[in-house]
Image (cartoon, rainbow, N blue to C red):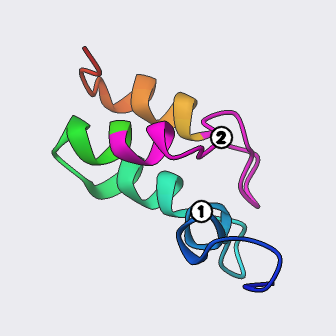
């Protein structure tokens, strides 16, 4: 897949065996909105569902993470 895209693009869109992307993980665990914002700026999809059916946007809302 690296030959088809830049390595960072691949990393941003990668998913683990549970369907979680780096954006899902940052939304769940990061206390820095800038980390989440950087992933979105690089093309991470906040509406992509993980294996449990949750989107990063839903996680951000649930946690009350201030994205402004």
Asked if residue 46 lies in the magenta stretch, the reply is: yes
Residue 21 tag number: 1
Can you tell which quarter of the image residue 63 is in? top left
Magenta span dominant secondary structure: loop
The magenta segment is 38-55
Question: Which residue is depicted at the point 74% across and 71% down?
Answer: 5
Label 1 neighbourhood size at 10 Å, few (<14), some (14-19), many (20+)?
A: many
Question: Which residue is depicted at the point 35% across and 44% down?
Answer: 38
Asked if residue 33 lies in the magenta stretch, the reply is: no
Cα separation, mark 1 vs mark 2, equals 9 Å
Q: Is residue 32 left or right of residue 5?
A: left
Vertical comparison of 15 with 38: above or below: below
Give residue 56's position: percent from left, percent from top.
Answer: 55, 40
Give residue 31's position: percent from left, percent from top.
Answer: 16, 46
Q: Nearer the viewer, residue 16 or 1?
A: 1
Question: Which residue is depicted at the point 79% across and 85% down?
Answer: 3
| SS for callout 2 | loop
The residue pinned by badge 2 equals 45
Q: Nearer the viewer, residue 5 or 14?
A: 5
Q: Nearer the viewer, residue 67 or 62?
A: 67
Question: Which residue is depicted at the point 52% across and 53% down?
Answer: 24
Q: Are marks 1 and 2 in contact (CB under 8 Å)?
A: yes
Can you tell which quarter of the image residue 15 is in? bottom right
Q: Is residue 23 left or right of residue 36?
A: right
Vertical comparison of 42 with 7: above or below: above
Question: Count the marks: how many?
Answer: 2
């Amino acid at each position: 897949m690296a030959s088809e895209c830049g390595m960072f693009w691949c990393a941003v869109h990668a998913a683990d065996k549970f369907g979680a992307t780096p954006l899902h993980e940052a939304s769940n665990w990061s206390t820095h909105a800038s980390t989440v914002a950087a992933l979105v700026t690089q093309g991470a999809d906040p509406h992509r569902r993980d294996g449990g059916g949750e989107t990063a946007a839903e996680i951000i809302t649930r946690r009350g993470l201030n994205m402004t």
